[in-house]
Image: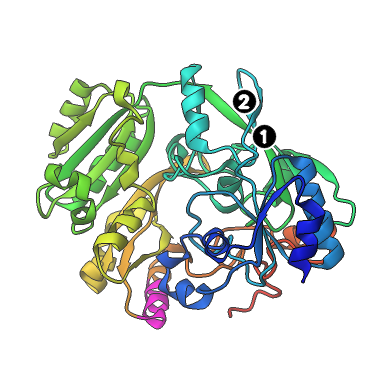
Amino acid sequence: MWVERLKNTIADQTEITSDNDTVERLSKDAYWYSPILYKELNGMKADCAVFPKNEEEVRTVVAFAVKEKIPLTVRGSGTGNYGQSIPLNGGIIIDITQMNQTVKETSASVTVQAGKKLGTLEKELRKKEKELRIFPSTFMKSTVSGFLCGGSGGIGSIRWGNLWDNNVMYVKMMTIEEDPKILHIHGEEILLFIHTYGTTGILLEAELPVEDKMEWNQYLLTFPTFQEAVDCCQYLTEQGNMPLRLLSTCEWPLPQHYKPLISYIDEGSSIVIIESTIMKKTMEKIVESQKGNMSLFIPSEKYQKGLKLSDFTWNHSTLWAHKNGENMTYLQARFDKSKLHSQIDTIKEEYGDEVQLHFEFIKIDEEITPAALPVLQFRSKERIYDIIDFFEKHGIQINDPHTYLLGFGGYNMRMDEIKKKKKAYDPYDLLNPGKIPKTREVI
């Protein structure tokens, strides 16, 4: 069995395990957010997992895998939601979480190894009066490589956009060949290596831009109606002098699932969550003018300490609903800012509480845009795609979170160029195989 040969090859230098429980755990992500993906992917796992501590140990594993033609899947930590890191063909999991050092720091950037946790990095930077531009709501667990290869945006995206908006300055990659090469990627070419589910090379290091630390206050606002909550968000985005790091809103009944916040939220209320440098007195005046209520204020000195309101935004919203509701799943959508209320009304008239709306405001092409993560009561795969068709019919763009195929989710990805990189740097198709579709036909 090739696992024994791998153990003999690396046992003196690299930890390896074929323990069933460990390998199964490392072979999973949060694919269960989607009942469709759960049905398709449940039970799939690697044959063993290795835990390299440095680049040379990764190289040894890669060289062995290429010689034996064994599939490889690179694993960090966090919560990928589309089965991005689930091995479809067994093989070796490369867990890179021990490669977690900071390599270089400047006043404008930080270079770190792939396994560095973003929560740790952000904490270290803030002690030095710096901060990251963007990170996912799962930043306490997520590794740099997991975010760059499987994510897109998150906290800070309202200011800085998504990963591909000049928020990654450099990546160091390893190819999957008999003699693995090291690639140093800068500029626009980076786009062929990030958000590609780790299919075009193994990410070893990344350089990320940093900014001067800001003092972020957190606010939980409540409103009698969702329309008023959305209006407040739009008002805030139209004020050019209000630095925002996070702006999130959702309608009732979603907030009923947020157990740590429920005492601050009246039944039936829609909520807005904000991270901003706006001072409390100024925010109180804004909330009064918008006919809302400030239910909770967390001052900047307690930022990322104790209760974090970001734990109830982005796909944490889906997670809370999944924990405390029944058969809950979600979509990813982009509404038209100029038609926002009419699109909301159309969705609610058609589906009521079957579709519970949740918006994150992010910068796209220099314009702050309402991106949605609506939570759905799952009934069937057919029903999901009927809802998607309805959204698209009414001008709402959908990124489908119920597929593990790269490019099928709706992102505008340069798939032809990505496939060329894949062929050049992984000629035997060993790196996370099965995630790049052979054609554009819907499966």
- Against 289, residue 362 (above or below) is below
Q: Nearer the viewer, residue 374 or 121?
A: 121
Name the residue at 42% across, 77% down: 385
User: Is there any visible trace of residue 436 in the rendered image?
Assistant: yes
Q: Are marks 1 and 2 in contact (CB under 8 Å)?
A: yes
Question: Can residue 246 be found in the magenta stretch?
Answer: no
Give me the C-alpha separation between circle 1 and circle 2.
8 Å
- Which residue does the numbered mark 1 point to in the structure image? 169
The residue positioned 52% from the left and 23% from the top of the image is 211
x, y percent for residue 172:
74, 40
Magenta extent: 380-390
Q: Is residue 232 left or right of residue 201?
A: left
Identify the disc placed on residue 300. none
Q: Is residue 235 left or right of residue 34?
A: left
Find disc 2 in the rendering and name its residue: 109
- Total numbered labels: 2
Residue at x-position 60% and y-position 46%: 148
Was residue 381 drawn as part of the magenta stretch in this picture?
yes
Q: Quadrant of the N terminus?
A: bottom right
* Residue type, numbered disc 1: Met
Instruction: Using the image as rendered, state which of residue 245 and residue 2 is in the foreground.
Output: 2
Within 10 Å of the Cα at label 2, are there few (<14), some (14-19), or many (20+) other Cα atoms?
some
| Residue 340 placement (x, y as % from top left) | 32, 55
Up/down of 374 relative to 193, above or below: below
Amino acid of disc 2: Ser
Comparing 172 with 219, the one in front is 172
Q: Secondary structure at mark 1?
A: loop
Answer yes or no: is residue 423 visible: no
